[in-house]
Amino acid sequence: MASTLALAACDRNAAAQSAPRVAPPLKSLAAFPVGTCAMTGQFDDPQWLELATRHFSQLTPEWEMKMEYILLADGRRRWDAPDRIAAFARGHGLRLHATTLIWYAQDHPWFKSLTGERFGREYDRWIADAAGRYAGQAAGWDVVNEPVAEDGDGLRDCLYSRALGQDGYMIRAFEQARAADPQAVLFLNDYNLENNPRKGATFLRLVERLLKAGAPVGGIGTQSHLDIEIPAGQTAAFIREAAQFGLPIHVSELDASLRRDGAFDPRTPKQKRDQQTARVAELTEAFMALPPAQRYAFTVWGVRDTDSWLRRGDKDDGKDSPLLFDASGAPTPMFDAVAGAFSR
Ligand code: G3I
């Protein structure tokens, strides 16, 4: 009898050790929305669905609410996928954050075919259609995405700046978005703001200039695709600088690649993990130090490592772990860094 009981206890112990750790719902640790990105194809993936609805309280369409999906070659619009994402968010009690209305990287062929007055009219109509359609559903929009030059020296030249002026296209976009959706928080969003202090400074000077020009910029989005090899303190310094405007701040697309592009990488896996968790903890703690009214949301750019854009196509080395859950849905050390900072 005793041996049977002992064997049963061993089995239970072994099972407990082998079962994946069930992490506490991340959203239950935060007094602000915790977001992730989504695409309609993920809604039919049971593991994604369980993790997304258990841990997150906000969704950002990863690409299907952008011009590249909605705007057809002849200028007509298709709304099936973005509508499905908005309905999914509503049906699962998730707040919707929308991205993006105007982005240099989406200089759509249809817009390229327009000139003169027609360009401006269609620019306004695009923003009115997209922001208007989700008015009352989207809590916020990335109105202009990635306006600052890659190296931080000035602003990007793009189809929209050439047609409507460098600051002009941005001021116009914010004004049109405000007219279409008087409630949404309207964000200027960019990346490498922590990684490259010059780019961060140029971005914040742009925010100041747009505000002075009367543009209804209502929030600052820092994508936070972190370079984990940057010096300690640089990430927190940007968040503190950004907080000076008193606007809501969105950590809008956090991921923290373990990879070093191209160059030989002598770091051990532990060294890379330690860098990653240190930088992610620094960002999260800096976000937590913001006044509650300035904590718009904390969004990671994907649920599992294998959902990440960093694990697609030629970028994928099959080993990167830039997010909070691994391919099996188990929490990564990055999860612990975020959850720990949320809980402090
Ligand atoms: O899923 C479709 C597939 O069915 C189709 O066959 C294929 C070919 O057309 O396209 C697939 O969709 C692609 C989608 O990613 C999913 O992989 C789109 O073409 C592709 O354009 C889309 O790329 C997105 C990219 O933004 C451009 O919108 C990425 O998912 C998304 O992670 C990335 O996100 C950006 C942020 O918006 C801005 N900051 C940088 C960040 C990473 O690049």
Image (spheres, grey):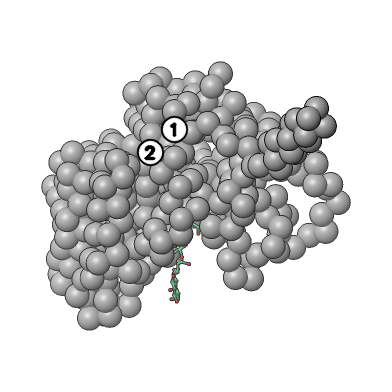
Q: State the separation of the CA atoms marked 1 and 2.
A: 6 Å
Q: Secondary structure at mark 1?
A: helix
Q: Which label was assigned to residue 27?
A: 1
Side (left or right) of 232 relative to 338: right
User: Which residue position is annotated with label 2?
Assistant: 57
Q: Secondary structure at mark 2?
A: loop
Side (left or right) of 276 relative to 151: right
* Residue with the most extreme front position: 1
Side (left or right) of 29 relative to 262: left
In this rendered view, identify the residue nearer to me: 213 or 66: 66
Q: Which label was assigned to residue 154?
A: none
| Residue 81 makes an appearance in the image | yes
Q: Which quarter of the frame holds ligand 1?
A: bottom left
Q: Amino acid at mark 2?
A: Ser
Q: Amino acid at mark 1?
A: Lys
Q: Position of residue 121 (x, y in %)?
A: 14, 66
Q: Position of residue 331 (x, y in %)?
A: 61, 41
